[in-house]
Structures are given as C-alpha cells and as structure tokens.
Image: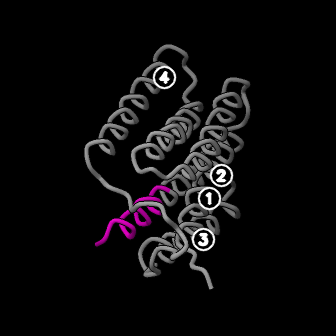
Amino acid sequence: MNRVRASRLIGSSFGLVFVQANAAALPTPVSIPLRVASIAAFLVLGVFNRRPAPETTTAPTPRFGGRYWLVVTAEVVGIAVGLAVINSVLHTPTATVGWIAFVVGVHFFGLATAWSRPQLRVLGGSMAACGAAGVALAFLGAPAAAVSTVAGILPGVLLFGSVWWSSRTTA
C-alpha cells in the first residue's frame, strides 16, 4: 500500500471511529443512519478509494518516519494526561470527547510541518475548535448528545471531508 492510500485509510478510519464512538449519545433514529453512513463513507473513501493523488498538487506524499512518530507520541501523551485530569481532578467525564478532538486537531499542526502540507492546518484548526467547544459545553453542563455531536461527530465528518478533498482529481 502506498503512502497516499495509507493516509486516506488512516484518515477515514479515524473519521469512522469518531462517528461510531459518539453516535450512541444520539437518539436511535438518528444514531443508526449516522452509523451506517459513516461505514459507507469509510468504505468509499478509505478502502475502495483507488484514485491517484491530484495531479495539480505539489505537496509531497506523507512520510511515516521519525517526525511523524514524534507528533503521534506527543498526541498520545497529551490525550492521556488530559483524560487523567478531566476524570480524576475535574470529574467531568463528558469533556473527554472534546479533549480528544482538541488534541487530535492540534496534532494536525505538527503533521502539517512534518509533511510540509500546510493545508492540514485547516483541518487541525477546525477539529481543535470543535474539541474546545465540546469541552466548554461539557463544563457548562450541556447534554451528552450536544457534546458528542460538536466534539465527536462533527470532527469525524471533518476527517471524512478532508480525505474526500485530498482524493479529488482535476478534470
């Protein structure tokens, strides 16, 4: 599997995880179609997407070397420390989804630098904003469905959209 296909599979996998993990907070008539749609998006964008990278791009293909693993390690540590504080010190477990989305969003800024792909900052900023809004909603006592939608489902949709955007070809 080449690096472009690997990055599409990774992006769509995380989009799937964000939606699947957070759809349970929604009413069943909304949750089930959303889950089915996310599985379809994962299959179309991540598994069966054989489109070549756009010809008009000059961006280098992603490299999963040392800089990538440094960003991922920082992400994992950031998530773990934040979750420990949110659950053990602040006692607001509904904020966890927002924290995860925030850290995942911030990690895209590192990937933008490591991969020389500044357009990833748009995805990163959008996801970080969703995560920050989700944390704020949780601390304000918003319903879990609102937090899950803003900080979980919307970031999943953003990930799917990013994979779609990166795989479009010019006519």
Image disc number at residue 87? 4
Provide the residue span drawn in magenta: 1-14
Q: Is residue 12 magenta?
A: yes
Question: Does the magenta stretch mainly form a helix, a strand or a loop?
Answer: helix
Asked if marks 2 and 1 touch (Cβ < 8 Å), the reply is: yes
Asked if marks 4 and 3 touch (Cβ < 8 Å), the reply is: no
Q: CA distance from mark 1 to mark 3?
A: 10 Å
Q: CA distance from mark 2 to mark 3?
A: 13 Å
Tell me if residue 24 can be seen: no
Q: CA distance from mark 4 to mark 1?
A: 26 Å
The residue beneath circle 3 is 37
The residue beneath circle 2 is 154
Extreme-top residue of the structure: 89
The residue beneath circle 1 is 157
Question: Mark 2 belongs to which amino acid?
Answer: Leu
Q: Is residue 83 above or below residue 38?
A: above
Q: CA distance from mark 4 to mark 3?
A: 31 Å
Q: Badge 2 local density, few (<14 within 10 Å), some, or many (20+)?
A: many
Image quarter (top left, top right, bottom left or bottom right) of the N terminus: bottom left
Question: Mark 4 belongs to which amino acid?
Answer: Asn
Foreground: disc 2 or disc 3: 2
Disc 2 on helix, strand or loop?
Answer: helix
Question: Mark 3 belongs to which amino acid?
Answer: Ala
